[in-house]
Image (tube, helix red, strand yellow):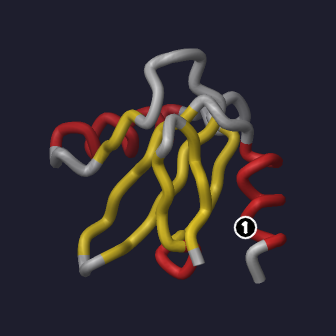
Amino acid sequence: MYIHIGNNKSIRDKDIIGIFDIEASVSDDTREYLAAAGRRNNAVYVSYEETKSFIVSVGEGREKVYITNVGHRTLAERAKNKK
């Protein structure tokens, strides 16, 4: 199944490793992780509006980090309802 993550973008639920609140995850390690994902071209900005969460996924053997303006609770609920 697919989860809508904002701005007409969906990803496969089985590829999702984790859904994180960007506000609660503002440690130096998280900032470096997101910056490194960007340097490796693994970061996908679903929306450039106010970012609320990020999703770590592994699909087709490649890690991707989706940064979105959809809240982590909303994304978790969407994933839960798909199962």
Residue 5 in picture, x, y percent from top left: 58, 48
Q: Which residue lies under the disc numbered 1?
A: 79
Which residue is painted at 73% across and 38% down in the image? 71
Outermost residue, top direction? 49
Residue 17 in picture, x, y percent from top left: 54, 71
Q: Secondary structure at mark 1?
A: helix
Q: Is residue 7 left or right of residue 20?
A: left
- Quarter of the figure that contains the N terminus: bottom right
Write down the quadrant of residue 31 in the picture: top left
Q: Is residue 76 left or right of residue 28?
A: right
Residue 50 in picture, x, y percent from top left: 59, 17
Which residue is painted at 73% across and 45% down in the image? 72
Which residue is painted at 57% across and 40% down in the image? 6
Q: Is residue 32 above or below residue 47?
A: below
- Quarter of the figure that contains the C terminus: bottom right
Viewer-nearest residue: 81 or 44 = 81
Viewer-nearest residue: 56 or 82 = 82
Write down the quadrant of residue 45 in the picture: top left
Q: Is residue 41 left or right of residue 70?
A: left
Q: Is residue 45 above or below residue 75?
A: above
Residue 2 in picture, x, y percent from top left: 56, 69
Q: Is residue 8 above or below residue 58?
A: above
